[in-house]
Amino acid sequence: MMYWIKLAIQSALSRKASLLIIVFSTAISVTILLAAFKIRDDTKTSFTNAISGVDLVVGNKASPTELILHSIFHIGRPTSLVPGSAIKEIESISQVKWLVPIQLGDSYRSYPVIGTTTDFFQQIRAQNKALAFSSGNSFGGGNHHEVVLGANVARQFKHQLSDKITLSHGSGIGPAQDHTDTPFTIAGILESNGTPIDNSILISTQSFNSLHDGSDGKVLFAQLSNSQYSAFFLGLNQRSAVFSVRRQIDSLKSPPLMAVMPGVALDDLWKTLEVAENALLLVSVGVVLTSILGIAAALLISLESRRRELATLRVVGVKPLQILFSIILESLLIVTAGIILAWIFLQALVFIFSDWLMKEWGILSTVGPPTANDLIGLLMILIAALICSIIPGIKAYRLALHDGLNPPNI
Amino acid sequence: MSSDHTVIEVKDLQFAWPQQTPLFDHFNFTIQVNQKTYIAGPSGSGKSTLLNLLAGVLDAPHGEIWVNGHAFHQLSGPQRDQIRGEEMGFIFQQFNLIPYLSTLENILLPLNLFPKRKAAALKDFASIKEAGMYLMTRLSLPFSIVDQPSHQLSVGQQQRVAAARAFIGNPQIVIADEPCSALDWENQSHFMQLFLELGESQKTNLLMVSHDERLAPFFNQRIDLPKRGIDQ
């Protein structure tokens, strides 16, 4: 077997120019497929790990998807707000270890403002890692009007510690809605973590309330009254209690609440994106198949000029089936070389663009070994190459039988 | 059934290409051990077809072909291929070498493909490389071309490399098809001398097909093929 592999390699290397083009085109097409796999997997991981360490997200009874989209991804609006009285109800459940409130509705230059407590920085994890400050620290408790910026917001507006910023009500469109009389001082900037937190501005719930209830001297907006919340993030003493706690929260009457397991909800949400995911994969598979057919065509064309070589092999006793096998082997070796090159290309691309992906798209992508999906994909490519190479293999087999010891003068 | 002293026996062979007059009609001949046989015939007399039949590449539809005690007419194609690889060597005029292999790799090709032949070479030499180098010496091939790709060799060198490949691993039969018609007479006789010497020293049964009558005296048995078909 080793000798046949050596022969196939030498045969392929004897046509260096065409081999180089074939291997390179295979590598590019396989890179496209592997990149599609990687983008899909990394996007899914980044999406489903957008928030971790949270066992339940609690909000007013509505659609779980809406609650998740609003509280984690800051997309859309809540149907209604949860009164502060709910905190006591929830905290009375013995299995609840911690509760982090979330208030949404304000913005800074179209980036969402989150009113929360300092527990947010201790309890919430992003991409399975604790939140970390690149500079400064958490906002002070009470009514200090301090703010913590997500990494993208700080980078986008080149903000530094102690800079003063003005928040806006709602989406922030129009100068009349700015909280111009309540400037906030930047107390901390978070490290990038590839989640919506990168695009957020975090302030204390007291500061958030003061913007709306007039405790700072002015009532600007009445929509958010004191101690109203968009959602709560809960951590439990034991994860196994999640169903029991969910049931207890769902059964609360005043106020009527809903508890959602974020992992399950995010997974359901991701499934709605399967159409786009499948379209991407379909295009990639098409590119790879075209490339493999190109290899088969190149081998098929080269056979005419290799009839003497095939006849020489027949002379020394090689069987027609062994010739068929050697052509298939050559094709598989070319595809394998393409796959190895593609893997190197992919790792290089990830290495070069991982920072950009994280900053621009919030996708955490790292260099690493192939996943199970990658290996299955690569195996399918090899099987496709095997099937396609049967065409030139059979042609070589027929030529070997037909020419015998008398190949035409080529 | 062929006797112990018979290397090749063709009995009552009948062969015709589709829609053509028969090339062989009840054709018979026998080649005994240690005979050097010269098969002569003009173009179209069926020399190539006969070689394909003796090599086992073509199947004999009627008659018997015995090669080294094997009933080729009863064996399958792959079985005949195996015997050809293990027990026979071939030298051709126009194509002989695998272009992407070096001189030595071409010579060692049968040993790497057939363990039986490799074992035969290793009876006399410490390694297959040594066996190849020995044949290169015998055929006056310089060691400087050992790693040279075969397509860079001269025609004469290519023929001698093909001869080395045919003889390596002590096959019982070596068949040559116009092996030196591309060479001038001086080189032809030199090649013939080396070819016959090697055959004698290795006790190989030699069979050569040619239309060049000047080569006939080198052999001790002659089989003539008429222009169309054979009557012996």
Image (cartoon, grey):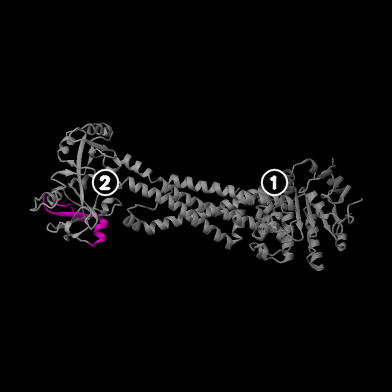
Which disc number belongs to residue B116? 1
**Which region shows up in magenta?**
A135-158
Residue at the spot 32% in from the left edge and 57% down from the top edge: A360
- Callout 1: 10 Å neighbours few (<14), some, many (20+)? some
Chain of the residue under the numbered disc 2 shown in the image: A
Q: Secondary structure at mark 1?
A: helix
| Residue B36 relative to residue A263: left or right | right
Residue A44 vertical position relative to residue A182 in the rendered view, above or below:
above
Q: Nearer the viewer, mark 1 or mark 2?
A: 2
Residue A67 vertical position relative to residue A360 in the rendered view, above or below:
above
Residue B221 vertical position relative to residue B213 in the rendered view, above or below:
above
- Callout 2: 10 Å neighbours few (<14), some, many (20+)? some
Q: Which residue is mark 2?
A: A70
Residue B126: x and y, percent?
A: 66, 52
| Snapshot quadrant of residue A302 | bottom right
Real-space Cα separation, disc 1 to disc 2, in angstroms: 76 Å
Residue B61 appears anywhere in the view: yes
Residue at the spot 45% in from the left edge and 49% down from the top edge: A279
Q: Secondary structure at mark 2?
A: helix
Residue A398: x and y, percent?
A: 70, 50
The three-letter code of the residue at mark 1 reads Lys
In the rendered structure, are the residues bearing label 1 and label 2 in contact, judged by CB atoms less than 8 Å apart? no
In magenta stretch: residue A224: no
Chain of the residue under the numbered disc 1 shown in the image: B
Residue A318: x and y, percent?
A: 69, 49
Are both tags, 1 and 2, on one chain? no
The three-letter code of the residue at mark 2 reads His
A117 or B172: which is nearer to us? A117
Which disc number belongs to residue A288? none
